[in-house]
Structure formats: C-alpha cells, structure tokens
Image (cartoon, rainbow, N blue to C red):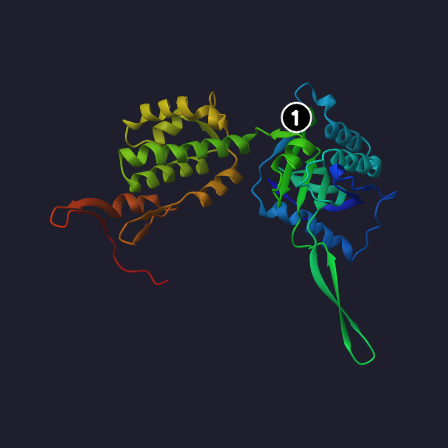
Amino acid sequence: MINLFNTHIESLSIHRVGNKSRNEPIFLSAFPYELNDELTPLLKEFFLKPFREKEENYYRFNHEADLEFHTLHGIAKKVFEDPSAIHQASQEITKHLYDQSSHPHIKAGEVYVTYFENMLLDNEKVNAIGVFKSELKTDFLQFKEGENQLDIKLQQGVNLNKLDKGAIIFNKVEAEGYKILSVDSNRYDTKYWLEHFLEVDVFEDDNFFTKKYMKFCQNFAKDVVLPAEDKKEEVMFMNRAVNHFAKNDTFEESNFINEVFENPDLIPEFKHYKVEKAPKYKIEDLTEFPIANTAVTAARKSIKNVIELDTNIQIKMDFINPESAEKFVEKGWDEEKQMYYYLVYFNKEQKS
C-alpha cells in the first residue's frame, strides 16, 4: 500500500521526445528544472494523482537473460546509489524512450523525470524515480486587455488534470527488479510503454496472489456455484469467501474450504476447477500466502452482491451482515404462477 501525502520532489528534469520513425527530434535539457513554490504542488498533483486513483498493480523490471542487461534497471540502480546522478540519468531514460518511439502511432511529448523522497510503501519510507510523459495538448483561451477591447488568443498546452503516461520506480527489492507502478491513459499502442520502454513483468507479491485467488473464486462462483445452486448461493459463496479473506492475515486453502463451502458436494468441483483454470491465474501451486488487505478491500467493491430478476426487481445482499440473507431470504416455486419467488422477512421498513 502506498501513501503519497508527504512525498517531496527533490529533482525534476524535463525533456522532449518525438517519433523516431518520422525523424522528429529529441530535445535534452542541459540542467534540471528550477522548481518554485507555486509550480511544485501543481506538478506533484499532476504526477501522482493517477496513482492514488488507480488500483495498485505492481510490476518489476524483467529481462530474458539477466537484469544486468536491463537498461532502466541499470539506470535506476545507479541513481539510487547516487541521487546526484539523476539529471544525467534522466537524459539516458529519455534517449531510451526515444529509441522505443518508432511505431507510427506514438505521439511526441514532454518527458518529466523526477527523484521523489519520503514515499510511504508498505509503511516504509522509500525514495523513488518518477518517469512521466505528456502527449495530448488541450486548447485554451488567453485574454488580453487592449485599449478598449478584450482580445482572445487561442493557445495549446498540457492539461494538468490528465497525465498521459507515468511510472514510479520504488527503491525496494532491487534484486527482484524493483517494485514499479505504471499508468497509461492513451492506449493507442499497449506494448509501447509497458513492454518496450519499461520492459516489466507482473510483480508476484501478496497483493498479486490475494487478488488472483479472489478473482479465481469469483469465476468459480459464476461458472459452478450458480448453475449448481442459484444466484443467491453464488452471492453468498462470494460473501463468505471475501469475509474469510478479510478476517485472516494468512490464507490457508484447507481452512478456506472448510469455512466457505456449506455444500460439501462442491468441494471436489472446486479442486477440479482449480486444476483446470489455475494456470490462467498463476495459482497452480498456491495453497498458502499472506493476505493483502488492500486487495481484499478492492475485491469487495468490485463483487456484485445483487440478485437481478427478470421482473425488473433487484435484491441487494449485505456483505457486512451475511446472516441476514441466510435467515431472512428464502427461495421457492409457485405452482399456480409457474414462477420462482423470493420470500423476504422483515420487521419494518428502514427510512432512507
């Protein structure tokens, strides 16, 4: 989990890259940019806002041979060992980005390379390198007072509310390729930023395993529990699964199965489903791992807890108090109407 509130921009270098295949130039600034009190908070928000709003999916530098041959890993390691080398490193990073900018769809833009201090990652203070790129320009109006007339001038600039591309390289687990976050708002070439420039792979940590296992459970509920039981049991299965993750620090598969499965007939189905589907989620041999609370919170928000009926009626189940659905919601069949029904017990209607 990251906390960016106390992050400080220690250094900022700004360059520009064009599209190499169109022979557009590269411009490298000779010196770091001199920040001021007015601009610094605006740029900090511009750089970091997308990472606060985005789910934390970590990456790591990866090379098919060895990390010592990875361009950005080598540059990052040099900077973390000597932060004063950040501006020269920013030029090397921009040259590397320019070399990858050969696809005809890739747009020219400004490159910002920062050295961050006091980032909080997993409750530990770390420094980081930020690499950001602005591509799309926004039209805006400038006004100038004439002698007796207000004049309009149309100009173009960068919208500070939308960062086009960005990556934060945290000074953590260097031997594994560092922990990295990335955003890409303009997916006109999905391989350009992640695969060609950053050259990253998924960082398989507690957050990754928690998220993958819960997604696997969600699909099991949809593919197996729903056809075997009904929509209520699908929702309640995921409810029990999420609550199991939420109240435990460590996941242990046998405990999970004993607690979550109310219908023992589904346990062999679960084990078979895991053998069949596990490679897709990279959980083939995963039976025990520390649980990441941030992944559980994100999963709880994404899992639907609503039974939608073809009569344009919805029944919303409460994930916080699951016993209510077990005690006060019953499903049945009406012979006369030849329709299913849900019977809901209550004492009084709540005021909204």
Where is residue 193 drawn, in percent x and y? 66, 37
Q: How many numbered circles are shown? A: 1
Q: Residues within 10 Å of mark 1 (few under 14, many from 20)?
A: many
Q: Quadrant of residue 148?
A: bottom right
Please give the residue where the numbered disc 1 appears in the rendered image. 62
Where is residue 113 drawn, in percent x and y? 76, 42
Q: Is residue 70 left or right of residue 261?
A: right
Where is residue 328 drawn, in percent x and y? 25, 48
Q: Is residue 123 above or below residue 73?
A: below
Q: Quadrant of the N terminus?
A: top right
Please, which residue is most extreme toward the left here?
A: 336
Between 149 and 280, the one nearer to me in the picture: 149
Where is residue 36 drawn, in percent x and y? 81, 54
Instruction: Identify the element where label 1 is drawn.
Output: loop
Q: Is residue 146 above or below residue 111?
A: below
| Residue found at x 67% / y 23% | 63
Q: Quadrant of the C terminus?
A: bottom left
| Residue found at x 27% / y 33% | 228
| Residue found at x 82% / y 76% | 146
Please, which residue is most extreme toward the right here?
A: 30
| Residue found at x 74% / y 28% | 71
